[in-house]
Image (spheres, rainbow, N blue to C red):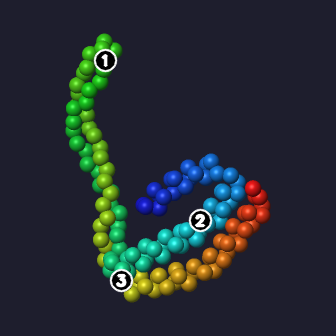
Amino acid sequence: MRSIFLLIPALALTACATPRESCIYDANRQLNSLRSQISTAQGNIDRGFALFEQIGTVVTEKTCQELTPEGDIRSFDCDETQTSQTSVPVAIDVAEERAKLKNLLQQLAPLQRATNEAVQRCIMIHPE
């Protein structure tokens, strides 16, 4: 879920980005995702458990007011919905998580090289 929230500002920025910036952003996308996965796995190992983001919704009844066309204030019952996000601990197999982290770390160097090459291509294709 967190990745969705991170993606929204990135999409807003790419809407105003130059072709070069968009190309570099696209070139870095996989590397950024891998780094995020590495960070998550390392955090899970350090804690000994994973965190699941749980979204809760609470609806409360309250009194609302509106201005009528005649200029009077009218009160009425209405519902207000509030959402909250809570991190819930989830049991993991730490050995399995370590194996996953090792695999992710093995992917890092080759992907970093490929990303650097892609960024250089972006710079060549889209000079400033």
Name the N-terminal-most of marks 3 and 1.
Answer: 1
Looking at the rendered image, the disc whose residue lies closer to the viewer, 3 or 2, is 2
Return the x and y of residue 41 as percentages of the image width and height: 43, 77
Q: CA distance from mark 1 to mark 2?
A: 52 Å
Seen at 32% across and 64% down, the residue is: 87
Give residue 97's position: percent from left, percent from top.
41, 82
Q: Residues within 10 Å of mark 1 (few under 14, many from 20)?
A: few
Please identify the quarter of the rendering in which residue 46 is found. bottom left
Residue closest to the eye, 128 or 114:
128
Find disc 1 in the rendering and name its residue.
Answer: 68
Q: Residue at x 36, y 83 (%)?
A: 93
The residue labelled by disc 3 is: 93
- Element type where label 3 sits in the image: loop
Residue designated by label 2: 29
Q: Are marks 3 and 1 in contact (CB under 8 Å)?
A: no
> Which secondary structure lies at badge 1?
loop
| Rendered-image quadrant of the C terminus | bottom right
The residue at the far top in this view is 70
| Separation (CA) of disc 3 from disc 1 | 61 Å
